Image (cartoon, grey):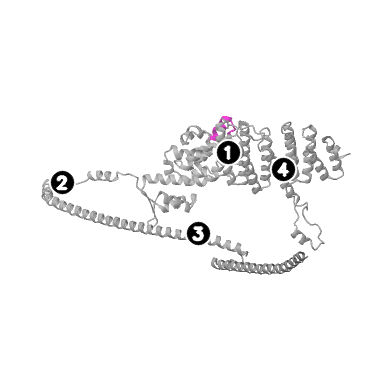
Amino acid sequence: MSYQQQARPENARERALELLEIKQPNAALKLLHEVLSSRRHKTWSPVHEGIMKLYVDICVDLRVSREMKDGLHQYRNLCQSQAPNSLEKVLLHLLEKTENLPCKDEGGSGEGKYDDLDDPTAPLKQTLKPPVASYTVNIKFVMEVHRAIMDILRSHSKLAHVYHKAAITGLTFLADLNRKSDFKRLCEYVRSHVNNLQRYGKSDSKMRNWDGWSSDALAIIMQTKLVILKLCQKLKIPSEMYRTLEDFQSLRKMGNKLQFNMSGIAKGYFSILLSVCLVNGDFYLVGLLAAKLLDIELEAGTDGEEIMRLANTVTLATICSPAAPTARQIKLIHLINNLSRIDLVDEIGQKYIQYCEPNVKSIFDSFYESNGMYLLQGDLSGLLDGVKDAKIVSFDGADQPDLQVPLRTTLLSAHLKMLSKYYSVVKISSLVSKFENIIGRATLEKIMVGTGRVDWRNDALRFQPPNNTKWIINLTKSLSKVHAEPVAADDVAFFDQIKSSLAEENLAAVARKSIIEKEKEDAERKQMEISMQGARKKAEEDAKRKQEEKHRLVIEEKKRELEKQKKIHQELEEIEKKKFIEALGQSAEESKDMSVEELQRKHQAKLAKKKAAQEKSISLRLKKLDYTVRAIRDEEVHIIKERLERKLMQHKQ
């Protein structure tokens, strides 16, 4: 079979199966990859789905994540516009294949160990290149598979359910193996995808395969966030739980804009919040959340035991909570949807108390219904022992809540508050003997310090007086009722004595007033003089500083002018020096240490020498010319004489 025939999709799968039969999976993988990435076969057909499934099976058998990612990307580009359902089938097939991989150390397989005990170099080999267990390779491969599926479908609206199935499967897989760091890394991967969709995934966005936000897409993402919250609760990762709660709150705000109905996921969300508040000891919010869950359960008609647990939790948490919410708690109330009540005491007495256990009812009646008189006279240890085995809400995988300590603290604080209404002093020894076994000595001392003033020397707890601003008026009124009858004669003499001294007191007061006013005027005058002197001194200093600044500016201006002239002079010298260097025909390195005057003298000497050489050459030429002219004349004399003689001879003839 030729290569072109093998590259056709119809023949490639058969050829790959033949290669697998002869134990050549790498060659089969390469052949299928060439078919998927070929430019000749860009139209999807059902044959491609079978090829892709075989390709996925080979990648899983070989544990090659890089080729698997590349093949998935090629197949997504091939079928995303024509057959997105085929991509879904392939991805689900891949998830199903990875579920069967062994990812736990069985302890007796012997994989990843050196079995040659007779080889003395085996410990050295294991140190230099330690073996890798197969389950470790499988864990890494499964993680890469889930990340690849999530990366391919991060903005695919039609296959959003496949994305979130892969996310939930991967998170559950890591939670079962107790790999917290990898779990947090995958949570951050999901968070980045959701944040990108919130930032850029509008309805008019150009993101590929994204149809915009809808109620279905939001519901799927919220379900995934709820799974993350439950797994964080199981793994005890509070930091990731709080970050996921913040993400959930931002999604709820988006859901309000889309008019999204949260009734389907409200129960799970409130349960997670309830567990977080129980761990943090925020009993005010615990009561509100438990009341919200109780309303949901009553509407759904749940069995009696679950309703009893929630009712007990609402009642006991309300008893443990402070009388008024703090500012932080008021800010956190927005986490609870459609919350319209702040105080649950009246609602518990009217609606929820009927579902509580008898012991919980009795402690509620003792705390609220009897105006606290039972706390003053009754046995607190009996109340606490009664609610010790009360059933409250519990969560799988999380620490079970314990309300005994806050209940003891709250009941003892209320008891001391009731004592302060009727007593001003209480013996500390009696309180210690009565409550030390219930709450502990250290906690008891903290409560006593917060309630009143502790006098250890006299073994007394002194309660603070009531905050009454008119106590002195009430005291004077009460004292005015108990006094002796005054004698009239003594009163007249007393008032006459006061009247006689009024004039002197008036004069003394006027004199003192004048003295005080005079001293005040003197002090004001001195202060004015000091201020005027300071202002004058400051003005002189400012004038002096301005003059110095002006003088400094003039000097700097002159310096700048001199530097400018010096720079111009240096530039002119450089230009002149360059001319002399060019005239002399020397290099810059030879003449860099010579000044302009030296170069000028050297140039003049060169010119003089050149002139002398020219004059000498001219004189020599003149002499040569003179010699030549004389020689010519001498020759001409002979010739002229000969001519003259010939002419004379001719005339004679």
- The answer to whether 255 is drawn above or below residue 528 in the figure is above
Labels 2, 4: front one: 4
Marks 1/4: CA distance?
26 Å
Instruction: Name the residue carrying label 4.
Output: 145
Instruction: Name the residue carrying label 1.
Output: 248
SS type, badge 3? helix
> In the current view of this chain or complex, which residue is farthest to the front?
653
SS type, badge 4? helix
Q: Foreground residue, 471 or 612?
A: 612
Labels 3, 2: front one: 3
- Mark 1 / mark 4, whichever is N-terminal: 4
Marks 3/1: CA distance?
73 Å
Marks 3/4: CA distance?
75 Å
Q: Is residue 480 left or right of residue 43?
A: left
Q: Are marks 3 and 1 in contact (CB under 8 Å)?
A: no
Q: How many marks?
A: 4
Residue 294 shown in magenta: yes
Residue pictured at 47% horizontal, 47% vertical: 409
Question: Which span of residues is magenta-colored?
Answer: 292-305
- Mark 2 / mark 1, whichever is N-terminal: 1
Marker disc for residue 568 = 3
Q: Main secondary structure of the magenta part?
A: helix
